[in-house]
Amino acid sequence: MQFTYLNHKLLTKLFTTGLIYLFSTVSCLAQDKAYAVDVVKKLASPAFKGRGYAENGAKIASSFIAAEYKRAGLIPLNKDSYFQPYKLSANIFPGVVSVQLDGVTLTTAADYLINASSPSVNGTFKVIPVSRSQINTEQALPSLLNGAGDSFLLLDNRPDSKETAEEAKIIADHIAQLKNDKSLSFKGLMIYTEDKLTWTSLTYQSVRPVVTINKKDFDPKTVKSIKIRVDAKLIPDYETRNVAGMIKGTVNTDSLLVITAHYDHLGMMGKKVYFPGANDNASGTAMLLSMVKYYASHPPKYTMVFIAFSGEEIGMLGSKAFVENPLIELKKIKFLTNFDMAGTGEEGIRVVNGTIFKDQFDRLVQLNDQYKLVPKVDIRGESCNSDHCRFYEQGVPSFFIYTQGGIRAYHDIYDRSETLPFTEFEDYFQLMVKFFDGL
């Protein structure tokens, strides 16, 4: 009777302790998601100016990240500073951006985009409609441009089903010439497409303005004139900065685990329109900062380094600046993981360099199978498509991981925090903690 009673007490205690642990773990993960949602909401808000180089958006974002590092107690990597300054060239649109066709004002970034390399332009110009069939031969451009002078060409770029592969290649080459060839004489180019409008950022200015249009019920054959103003500015030596800090390991302080994400996005198109970049890559930055917060209160075995890069969208220039002037010894990096687009996950995650570092990939899959976290872990080969690449080129073992599924907003004005689902964020976070802790 006494034995049974004691066992009952012991079982009750174990059960209670287990419940407390379970609820505390769930609470911790819920708080991590709430924190991540708040980070994305801030970074993707108008106050951060699209985290580009107009109105110091990237600098505002870097200051926010540095403040989070300090709050968590990270050790600055650059002597007494979290910042690693470097310079890049950027073409920005800090003033007026406006397009009218035959007196009808188009909605910036919804109906049209200004090409990221466009120079300034201001005035009203004649429009010459052009079809793809008019530029499908090698001899087409001289006759087309004869007398074009101070006019805009408006190319209907919807492919014809009868178009051959050879013609499509010639047309693509001619479009590139129309955009960039200094020897061609005309004012500007408009391209009508039914493809999704997707922007970027660039380090240079091209010879003429280019406008891409995708507007419902638009008939390019009827347009007679364009009134356009674009205030562009090329800044050849803009100073931006990476944000880097570390947490000392409890056992092995010589080997380093590195977690990275880029915080920059595309910035602004004019004074009113900005590109929020919630998934790309406020979400990856939120994952990095969630790891900062977690490991600040759960000291890691290995020293962990956290680097938030600027300049990724404009050519992975922040990571390039880091590996050229490293604040740590690259050869001491045991493993690097780069987070980009971490805000969905309905279709699981994909691991770039998974085929290269197969042991680590297999371990990630094993952990996911064991704990039933994200829907699946897909493998991908090497690809120089984010900041991990600059380290991988230097021989650093590295993954680039991104979530799959969910919203399709990308490099547009619709990549907003309020529509980002965070479907698998908690499970993804838990999977990566288990992965890091076992390295």
Image (tube, rainbow, N blue to C red):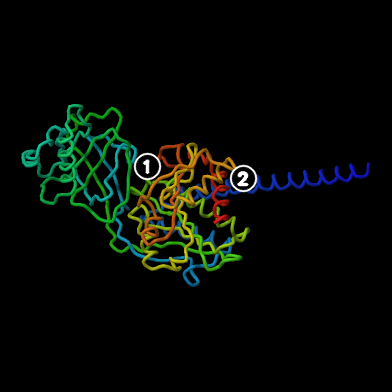
Give me the C-alpha separation between circle 2 and circle 1.
29 Å
Q: Does residue 160 sit above or below 331 in this rendering?
A: above
Q: Residue at x 22, y 38 (%)?
A: 191
Q: Does residue 369 sit above or below 82 in this rendering?
A: above
> Considering depth in this image, is 20 or 186 the residue closer to the camera?
20
Q: Residue at x 66, y 47 (%)?
A: 25
Q: Residue at x 14, y 32 (%)?
A: 133
The residue tagged 1 is 412
Quadrant where the N terminus lies? top right
Rendering quarter of residue 89: bottom left
Q: Residue at x 10, y 47 (%)?
A: 185
Instruction: Report the residue that reaches farthest toward the bottom.
Output: 79
Q: Earlier in the sequence, mark 2 or mark 1?
A: 2
Rendering quarter of residue 141: top left
Kind of residue at badge 2: Ala
Q: Position of residue 426 (x, y in %)?
A: 57, 44
> Considering depth in this image, is 219 or 26 the residue closer to the camera?
26
Kind of residue at badge 1: Asp
The residue tagged 2 is 30
> From the viewer's perspective, is 317 left or right of 226?
right
Label 2 SS: helix
> From the viewer's perspective, is 382 left or right of 305?
left
> Considering depth in this image, is 24 or 83 the residue closer to the camera?
24
Label 1 SS: loop
Q: Position of residue 125 (x, y in %)?
A: 16, 41
Quadrant where the C terminus lies? bottom right
